[in-house]
Amino acid sequence: MLRSALLVATLAPLALGCGAAPAPPTQSQNPADFVLLGGAVRTLDPARPEASAVAVRGDRIVAVGTDADVRAFIGPETRVERLSGGAVIPGLVDGHCHLHGLGAALESLDVRGKKSPEDIARLVAVEAKGRAPGEWITGRGWDQNLFTPAAFPTHDPLDAASPDHPVALERIDGHALWANAAALRLAGIDAKTADPPGGRILRDSMGAPTGVFIDNAMDLVTAKMPGEPPAVIERRILRAAERALSLGLTGVHEMGIGDATVAVYRKLAAEGRLPIRVYAYLAGGPSLSTLSQRKPDVDPQGTAMFVLRGVKLFADGALGSRGAALLAPYADEPKSVGISIADRKTLTDAARIVADAGFQLAVHAIGDRANRDVLDAYAALGEGRARALRFRVEHAQVLAPEDIPRFAALGVLASMQPTHATSDMPWAPARLGPDRLRGAYAWRSLQNVGARLVFGSDFPVEETSPLLGLWAAISRKDPSGAPPDGFMPEESLTLDEALAAFTAGPAYASFTEATHGRIAPGYVADLTVFAGALAADRSLLDAKIDRVIVGGKVAFGAAIPKPEAP
C-alpha cells in the first residue's frame, strides 16, 4: 500500500464530491494550536513508527510527519517548540497504582529501606514528639526481608518509642500491618481474638498477638483509625497527581477506591481541577451487593478525566509476607501455602455479579493457586465473556506454566508491574524454589502466547516513576545494574514492547485504544516529552521529563512558546 509522507486527520467533516480528493492543508485552513518540531517521535503506530514532528489542535493530534510536513499547520497564532532531538511518546499511563494512596503516603511516615525494627522505632519516636497524646501515627514501607534476621517484628520496639500514641505501619506491599500495644488496646485485640477469614494474626509462643497482621487481619486495626474528611482526600489526590505528572505520567488506573474517594474525584473532574486522567476501580467486597444498582461510566471519545468502570477484588495476599496462595508449600516455609482471601467459588460468584452489572473486573492474584482460581472463575462465565468485558488479573506474578496460555485463550489482561520482579529478586527464589520460579514475572512468556500486557508500578508499593518500570522490563536489573546478566533475562522485553505495555496496554484496558496509546492523527493529544532521546540502556533512568501534555494542554513543564514575530 502506498502512503503519503504526511499523516493528516481533519476532525471537521469534509463535503467532497464523488471521487474528489481533499485539498492539501494550508496554514489558513488548518492551523494547529501548537506543533513540536525536530523530535525523535516514537509513535507506536505500526503505520508510521517514527516521525520528527507532531501538530495538535484542541485536544487532538492532527498531523504526524517530518518537520517539513507539519510546518503546513503553523499559523500566526500557532505555538512552536523545537525539540532538538528530544523524544516524544504517547502519554505514559500507570496501569495499576493507588494515586490517593500515594497522597496519603506522602503525608505519613516513610520507613522504606530501613534495616531493622529499631531503626524504624527511632523514626516513630521523633514523629511522636510532635503529636498530641492519643493521635495515631501511620506510615508505610517496612520490609522484614531487610532485617537481620529476616523475621517479622514485634510490637515491643514501637511500644518503647511511642507508648502514648497508637502506631500502625503498613508493610511495603500493603499486605501486612505492624502495630504497637496502644493500637492493639484501642482495637480490642488480645490472645482471644480469632484470625478473620482471609487473614492471619501473628502470635508468640503463648498465643498473644505480636503486633503484625496479615491481609484481612489488618482490618481489625484499621477499622479503629479515624477516617479522612473530603478536604484531606482532595489534598492528597492533588498532591499525588502533581508528583505523577512530574514523572511523565498522563494517566493512571486507580485500583480499589471507596465511594468517598470516588465522590472527590468526580468533584475535581467536574470543576476542571483534576490534572491527570484517572480510570478507576471500585473496591469490591461489600459494594458487590449493590453493584446491580450502579452503572459503569463510559468514555466513547476518550476525553473524560475521571472514569469509574471497574471493580477490584483480592484472591490472595503478597509473596513478601507469604500471603500469596500457592499450589504447593513455600520452599522456605513448608507448612504454609499462603492465604486464599477468596476461593474459587467466591471468585466465580463475584465474577458473574460484576459481569451481569456490565463492569470490568480486576482481581489481585499473586500466587499460582490464586491465578488459577481467577482464570477458572473467568472461564466459568462462558465463551468470550471475560474477553468482551476485558477482565484483568492484577500482578499475575507466579504462574503455573500450563496456565500461561490461558490468558490469551480467555482474553484476560495480564496487569503486571516490572519493578516487582527487581524488588523481589533477592528473596523470591527462596520463597518459590527453582522449578516454580520459572513461571514467575513471566512477561515475555505471556507476550509470546498472545496475552495483552498492561504495565504499572503499584505505587506507593514501588516508586512512582515509570522509567524504573521501563528499565526493569528491558533489563531485568535494579537501578544499580544488578544482577549483571539480569534476573531471569529470558523474560525481558524490548524498549518498544515495554513502552507499549505502559501506553497501548492501559489504553486497551480502559476501552480507549481508538483514541489513546499511539501518536496518530485523530488520537487524543496525551504526550510525554523528554529533553533527550530514549535508549534501551542505563541512560533511560536518567531521562529528563521536559513536558507532559494532557488533552492538548501542558500539565507539567514550561508553556510552549509562540513563534517569533516576523
Image (cartoon, rainbow, N blue to C red):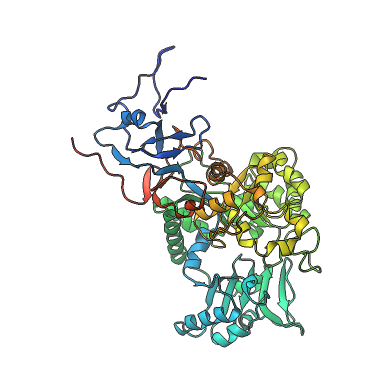
In the image, farthest residue toward the top: 18
- Could you tell me residue 201's position as x and y percent? 71, 75
Residue placed at 27% from the left, 44% from the top? Answer: 561
| Residue nearest the observer in this picture, 289 or 482 | 482
Residue placed at 62% from the left, 54% from the top? Answer: 486
> Where is 330 relative to 444, above or below?
below
> Where is 508 relative to 261, above or below?
above
> Where is 507 relative to 395, above or below?
above
Residue placed at 46% from the left, 37% from the top? Answer: 519
In the image, farthest residue toward the front: 484
- Could you tell me residue 19's position as x and y percent? 44, 12
Horizontally, residue 450 falls left or right of residue 402, namely: left
Residue placed at 77% from the left, 83% from the top? Answer: 205
- Could you tell me residue 52's position as x and y percent? 40, 35
Horizontally, residue 179 falls left or right of residue 530, namely: right
Q: Quadrant of the C terminus?
A: top left
